[in-house]
Amino acid sequence: MSKAGLVPDSSTTRPLFLYLTSSAALPLHAWTILTSLHEAGHIIPIAAVNVILESLTILDQLDKAVDSYKQLHNICTDGPNTETFNSLLQGVARKEKRKDQAMFLAAEMAALGVKADQLTYDRLILACLREDDYEDAFRYLEEMIVVGQDKENEDGTRGWWMRGGTAGALVRRCIVAGDERAWDLLSEMARKNMGNSKLRAWADEMWKAREDGIKNEGMNMGWGL
């Protein structure tokens, strides 16, 4: 495809992705093949690397995916692109307590001048949610809104925000922590027509139960005297 002047991307590598994810051993075998092709003088497009990294993350081999990323420059002169990091962040967001890897990848993007897109921020938010201190999730949300304020979405609207599932996860995290920012998030979800009636009902119920629990605890400790 490259020799024919066509630029491979994620859409053209879907058949490879389906094959590579059929066995845990195949992605690293594919990496060996790419290395051999590079040594034989072939130019390796970043899409070929990305499909291997994505396959590794889907197969729950995140550490191997990150190790492969660190060797990327040995076989691909183009270097990583936004899709490279999004694939890796997908694996990070699915793991518990991997914020350090998310921060490493975010720093790599900044150092290499690779621009984050809406999906990048979404997955960074998810990675931060899995920590006890999830404040960075809101920092990335704020940055996401600023960076994407003039960007056009597929539905014709402008401005970046979280996907519905990510927004819901952040709401639930806030409700459990007693964080009142949950209500602003729910209002924004409603404004963006993200169906959240069940989530709001759950939030109302959990918030009331939490307040009742705090009130009862205070009564037991003599606060109501």
Image (cartoon, rainbow, N blue to C red):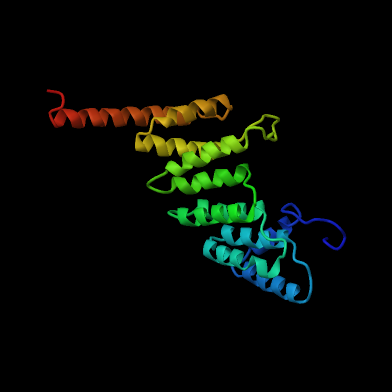
Asked whether 18 or 99 is in front, the reply is 99
Quadrant showing the N terminus? bottom right
Q: Tell me: 179 left or right of 3.
A: left
Asked whether 39 or 200 is in front, the reply is 39
Residue 11 spot, x, y in % from top left = 74, 52
Look at the picture and state if 52 lies above or below 87. Answer: below
Does any portion of residue 136 appear in the rendered image? yes
Query: Residue 35: which quarter of the image?
Result: bottom right
Residue 188 spot, x, y in % from top left = 53, 27
Q: Tell me: 60 left or right of 37.
A: left
Quadrant showing the C terminus? top left
Residue 197 spot, x, y in % from top left = 49, 27
Q: How many marks?
A: 0
Does any portion of residue 161 appear in the rendered image? no
Query: Residue 34: which quarter of the image?
Result: bottom right
Q: Tell me: 36 left or right of 6.
A: left
Residue 154 spot, x, y in % from top left = 70, 35
Q: Residue furthest top?
A: 225
Asked whether 65 or 43 is in front, the reply is 43
Q: Please give the name of the residue rendered at 44% of the width and 27% of the height, measured from the top-left corner.
A: 183
Q: Please give the name of the residue rendered at 20% of the width and 29% of the height, measured from the top-left corner.
A: 216
Q: Tell me: 37 left or right of 195.
A: right
